[in-house]
Image (cartoon, rainbow, N blue to C red):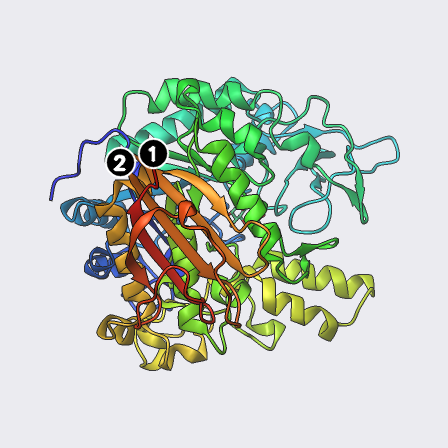
Amino acid sequence: MPLQPDPEWWKSSVVYQIYPSSFQDSDGDGVGDLAGVIGRLDYLKLLGVDAVWLSPIYPSPWEDNGYDISDYFDIHPRFGTLADWDRLRDGLHERGMRLVMDLVVNHTSDEHPWFTESRSSVDSEKRGYYFWRSPREDGQAPNNWGSVFSGSAWDLDEATGEYYLHLFSRRQPDLNWDDPRVRREVHEIARWWLDRGADGFRMDVVNFVSKSPGLPDGRPVGDFGSPDEHVINGPRLHEFLSEMHETVFAGRNVVTIGEMPGVDVGQARLHTNPDRHELNMVFQFEHVDVDHGPGGKFDPVPLDLRVLKSSLNRWQTELGDCGWNSLYWSNHDQPRVVSRFGDDERYRETSAKTLATTLHMLKGTPFVYQGEELGMTNAHFDDIEDYRDIETLRHYREIRASGRTTAEAVMPAIRRMSRDNARTPMQWDASANAGFTPGTPWISVNSNHTEINAQAAVDDPGSVFHHYRRIIDLRKRYPVIVHGTFAPLLEEHDSIYAYTRTLGEQILLVLANWSGEVAEVNLRPEEFGNSPQLLLGTHREPNTVLAPLRPWESRIYLGRRAK
Ligand code: TEU
């Protein structure tokens, strides 16, 4: 099936994120690989997704599961070869699906040749590729910035007596985008993959690449200072993104998705306004930070649906007319949404379906994270020994070293919020290791794979999988879902998420009960149009619009606008 030449294909697409390490292992080493992905393309075609975003598959020492790249022009041997990548590209394109790569260029691995050369001497020709600074007079780090992964954002290189900046792990030194040579190197990487047939990029923390001149101290947070005000949305970010668009992306039918922790909707309007030629869309974090308490993600607070609605609705209304939204609940950094925002015990399947309905009927491009379509849950690991993620492990060690609390006291928050919750192997069937690998998996398989797995879901017409398949199919059949204007309903309701989408005479009504209680629907007929027809619901018994919503019930109606 040829790829449609539509220059805005990414607006009507649903994108499936694959975390390759945990998707399908074909050679028994316990780690997923490209051959494994190729073997599952027909599953993705059945689901109906239009594109695949691959988390990094490049050579890497694997400090941060591949988000620390040591060679941008090859494939990590654990995943296969460039020939395998070519087969994957062709396999997707033949099925009418596109391939989006993960471009991690805010930083490299400390094993990248650029860094090896840069650190070799203060006079290295590549010294300027990274941020090297002399110690303060007292020998301390050049400023007070803390790392996203705990500890200082600076590491002292004994050999040259200078510090280098790393906003993440010490083995992920930040690239200095103020040096035009760095930007030219990045442009070459992007062109190389696009020339090879990639259909676009998800660009890792791309709003961090312009730092405040002078790298000044940040506001105190714990033992360090926050770099946020000095690395997020920096003074040259628009310039760098426009330059990259002009140099690399202009004239190509590709998608650019900027991952932007801390971006606000005003900035996103600028980044995704097509007249400004920067990016097609951004991954924002407001809605996945709503349950972060005063101490951050590992100090979680209960979800208040009104806060979540307020955030997402603001992005719908304020980005709806000039830019474009990405839509996601889950990815490799976030807990599994059915455990986080749904009910993974009493109403797992129904709440997973309603979370999907709520998200996929909004205006923007939906992203489905591997296993989300099955209603896969958090890992619920009991022991810190079961965790692999650097962010989780460094948090655990920092908390224990601080003596601020006991190991046991920190585990509930880790169980709830660790990135490893999303990184347990894809659950293909009820067999050993869920059919993910014949070997020993690099991270434990969730024990509930005996009930929650793709084989059972595909065979069950009432499964979460088939709800996702139907939701994705609706998007292909009803232009109102892609192009319709958004309008919120019942904004102050504490358990119903309701809204409409309007296009011409058509009005789509979405009603979703985000609770385990029955919820009354108090809407006026003029709010949802005439003769609404039920398009898709979570319950077998169809219901009229104003019928109460059963626990975690959602319903989608299509009607005609009231005159
Ligand atoms: O994540 C950016 C980022 O800020 C995340 O660290 C996120 O805020 C955090 O994980 C929430 O707990 C990107 C990648 O998605 C992530 O996997 C990498 O670890 C990070 O950048 C560094 O490349």
Image location of residue 293, percent across then percent down? 71, 56
- The answer to whether marks 2 and 1 mark residues whose Cβ atoms lie closer than 8 Å is yes
Q: Amino acid at mark 2?
A: Trp
Q: Residue 498 location in percent, x, y? A: 47, 52
Residue 247 x %, y %: 37, 19
Most foreground residue, 119 or 195:
195
Q: Does the closest atom of ligand 1 sit within 8 Å of the Cβ of label 1?
A: no
Image quadrant where residue 409 sits: bottom right
Task: Tell me which amino acid carries mark 1.
Answer: Val
Q: Of marks 2 and 1, which one's residue comes earlier in the chain?
A: 2
The numbered mark at residue 338 is none
Q: Which residue corresponds to mark 1?
A: 255
Question: Can you tell which of label 2 and label 1 is closer to the viewer?
Answer: 2
Residue 122's place in the image compared with 82, above or below, is above
Check the picture and name the quadrant holding the N terminus.
Answer: top left
| Residue 406, percent from left and from top | 78, 72
User: Mark 1 falls on what kind of element?
Assistant: strand
Q: Residue at x 62, y 33 (%)?
A: 232
Q: Can residue 440 be seen from the camera position used here? A: yes
Quadrant for the C terminus in the image: top left
